[in-house]
Image: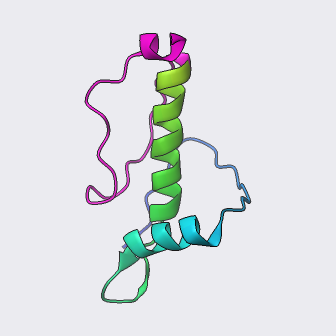
Amino acid sequence: MPRHTSPDLRIDWKISLSATLGGAVEHEIMDPLTGKPRYGERSKLIGALLAEWLLKHRGRKIPFDPPALDLYTPPTDVSPSESSS
């Protein structure tokens, strides 16, 4: 099956997280059949969380490729006015 191609350019980031946080995330995105993280789920999850953060703090809606539904459910009410408090 071919990979999904995005018309947007990609940027590679290298980040460091605590082993506890990283391990908890890896456990949640693990494919039970292969014992490995599902392909692309880490990037999709980070993209969804950053897009949500931009919407909340700057009122900018950025399109993103959502992760699997069992990993991330977007909030139902995110309004830019909440960030002013």
Q: Is residue 5 visible?
A: no
Q: Is residue 67 visible?
A: yes
Q: Is residue 28 above or below residue 8?
A: below
Viewed as shown, does residue 77 lie left or right of 67?
A: left
Examine the residues drawn in magenta and state their main secondary structure: loop
Residue nearest the viewer, comparing 27 with 43: 27
| Residue found at x 57% / y 70% | 20
Q: Quadrant of residue 18?
A: bottom right
Residue nearest the viewer, comparing 56 with 37: 56
Give x and y (percent) for residue 66: 37, 48
| Residue found at x 46% / y 54% | 44
Give x and y (percent) for residue 4: 43, 58
Viewed as shown, does residue 26 lie left or right of 8?
A: left
| Residue found at x 54% / y 28% | 54
- Stretch in magenta: 58-85
Q: Is residue 27 above or below residue 45?
A: below
80 drawn magenta = yes
